[in-house]
Amino acid sequence: MVDLTVLPSYVAVILLFLGPPGPDMAYMLAVGLEGGRRSALKAILGIATGMSVYAAAVVAGIGKIAQSHPLVLDAVRIAGAAYLLWLAYVTMRHARRAISGHSDIASGKWYLRGMVVSLTNPKIILFFLAVLPQFIGSADNPSVQMALLGAIDIGMEVVLYGSIGVLSGFFHARLVDSTRATAVLNYIACAVYVVLAVTIFTEILLH
C-alpha cells in the first residue's frame, strides 16, 4: 500500500520547486516564442520523458550512486549549460535566416531538445535525488510510493510549464507572418538560453 497522507505536503514542496524560474520554465517560454504552440507541446513531452528517466532511476536505486559522487552531478550540469549555449547559437542562426526570409524554424527537434534540457536540469536532478525519498512515509512498498510521487511531479510540471509554453506560443502565432518580429522573438529566446547557461555555470563555480 502507498501512503497518501504525505500528498498535501508533497504537492506544496513541488510548487515551491516549480515556482522560481529554472531551465525548464525558461526553456518552455523560449520554445513558445521561437516555434509556437505546437513546438511547445512537443517540447513539454520531451521534458516529461527526461523527468521520467530520473524518476525511474531513483526508484531503481541509481540515485544513491549520484549522491555519493557529487562530481557526476556537476558534470551533468556543465553539459546542460553547454547544450543551452548551443541552442542559443542555433536560435540566433534562425533569427538571422528569418531576417533574410529563409527561416528554417520548422526543422527544430523540439521533443529531443526538451528531453536533453530536462536530463541536464539541476533542479530536477536534486528534486528526485534529495526530495522524493523524503516522502515515502509509511508506505509498505517504497518503490511504488516513489513511482507514484514521481508521476505526480511530472504531471504537475507538464501542466504548469506546458501552459507557459502554449501561452507564449500565442505571441509567435500573432507575429509569425512578420520576418522582423520572428527574428526578434528568436533573439529573445536566444537571450533566455544564454542567461540560463551563465546562471548554471555561475552556480557551479560558487558551489
Image (spheres, rainbow, N blue to C red):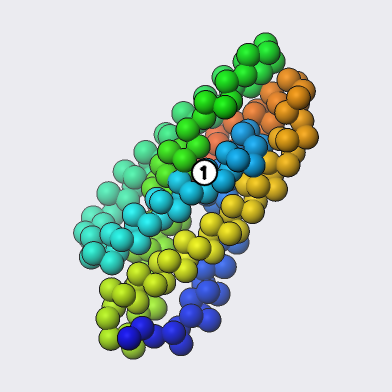
Left or right of residue 189, residue 124 in this image: left
**Which quarter of the rendering shows the N terminus?**
bottom left
The number of numbered discs placed on residues in the rendered structure image is 1
Q: Residues within 10 Å of mark 1 (few under 14, many from 20)?
A: many
- Kindly give the residue lying farthest to the top in the view shown: 100
From what the image shows, is residue 198 above or below residue 133?
A: above
- Kindly give the residue lying farthest to the front in the view shown: 38
Left or right of residue 155, residue 37 in this image: right
Residue 194 in the image: state x and y as whole percent: 55, 34
Whether residue 33 can be seen here: yes
Quarter of the figure with residue 124: bottom left
Residue 135 in the image: state x and y as whole percent: 39, 78
Left or right of residue 66, residue 181 in this image: right
Which residue is at 77% across, 23% downward? Answer: 178
Residue 78 in the image: state x and y as whole percent: 38, 40
From what the image shows, is residue 205 above or below residue 62?
A: above
Residue to which mark 1 is pinned: 43
Residue placed most toward the observer, 98 or 190: 98
Question: What amino acid is at disc 1?
Answer: Ala
From what the image shows, is residue 38 above or below residue 100?
A: below
Label 1 residue SS: helix
Whether residue 201 can be seen here: no
Which residue is at 73% across, 20% downward? Answer: 179
Which residue is at 53% across, 81% downward? Answer: 8
Residue 139 in the image: state x and y as whole percent: 32, 85
Which residue is at 68% across, 41% downward? Answer: 169
